[in-house]
Image: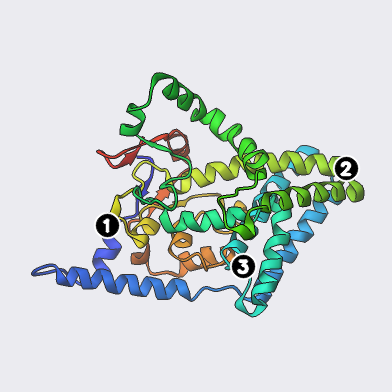
Amino acid sequence: MVATRTSKAAAAAAAPSAKGDGSAAKESKKELDRRRINHIKSFRATTGRSLWELFTTVALQLAIWLTVDRLNYYALIGLNMLLSLRWFMIFHDAGHSSYCPPAWGKQTTALFHRLISIPAITPLDWSYRHRLHHSHSGNYDSKAYGWNDTVFFTVKSFDKLGPVSKMALRIFRNPLFFFMVGPAIIWGIVFRIPNKRARQDITYEPIYNTVGAVLYGWAIDHFFGWNALECSLLSAYFCMVVGFMLFHGQHSFEDGYVRRGDEWSFQDAAIEGSSHMKIPRCFKWFTMGIEYHHIHHHDSKVPGYMLQECFESGAPEFWEGIHVINYSDWPSVLSTTLYDEEKQKFV
């Protein structure tokens, strides 16, 4: 099985028994949701922790650039790839207004978000689209945003395509092409084109970010040398590939959550439709908790650096029904390209 559900035993033991017309079961679920919400809401950004996380990130980045000519070049590319992922996660959290404490104020938070978008090589309008993703993920009938960001067709809609369209989609969604070439197309081309359908204040963010990224690259070359810039460019590409795979695995596992209209629920989409990915503990500092994606979708105001603590300190019944992706599941996860409505699973 690609993604396994957590056992219901803990929840069954902790929850009140359901009798009669089922009202007790409904009350039990309502109470469980309330306790889970209160637990998650207790995790919010603090100034000291946010500044420390930023300081350690900047310090490691400078260390990599300063030692690029002295240490193993390929090892540094791998390390810088992981650090690039961390830069993106800080940018991601800033877009949710979860990294900066409210005490920083809106102007400081907006400035921080803009500055951090440069090492993340991602324009600010991405954050706007990403918030729409949170509001509509798994909602097949949503008109405001797509129901999935990496799977575009159901089995039925795919069968209605012509032979040329089917062939083109098979090529595009081949895992090697999709995850190796796709990120370069998205970050290198799509994210560089102004979107005139976006809000007026973010229409030209792709241009601003591109200019900022070019100046950022010039500064790396000027102060640290060509090898540092080359290391940064290569690691940025590999970070995009890994990030794209992670993003796919967050929602497109075999028994993922896709519902129509009134059947869709924000909380169910978060808990049942967002995965908990198992990753080696040594990588957790770099991923900033995004592997606990079910918590992030439940409440995006929890900063990434607190997601692991939120998960580990929560009652076992809070996480009943979440989908766990183990290391051996990834080949199957990355091969999902369609959603089968009849079987209610990604294939």
- Asked whether, in this view, residue 44 is left or right of residue 3, the answer is right
Percent of width and height locating residue 200:
61, 58
Image quadrant holding the N terminus, namely top left
Mark 3 or 2, closer to the camera: 3
Q: Is residue 60 left or right of residue 167?
A: right
Three-letter amino acid code at the position of disc 1 = Asp
Q: Nearer the viewer, residue 287 or 11?
A: 287
Disc on res. 262? 1
> Does the CB distance between marks 3 and 2 fall below 8 Å?
no
Q: Amino acid at mark 3?
A: Tyr
Q: Is residue 306 above or below residue 127?
A: below
Where is residue 140 drawn, in percent x and y?
35, 47
Task: Check disc 3 and report the residue beneath it.
Answer: 99
CA gap, disc 3 and disc 2: 33 Å
Closer to the chain start, of discs 3 and 2, is 2
* Secondary structure of the residue carrying numbered label 3: loop
Which quarter of the picture shows residue 225?
A: top right
Dot 1 falls on a residue whose secondary structure is helix
Q: Which residue bears the numbered disc 2?
A: 69
Question: In the rendered image, is residue 67 in sight?
Answer: no
Q: Residue furthest bottom?
A: 103
Name the residue at 58% across, 68% down: 97
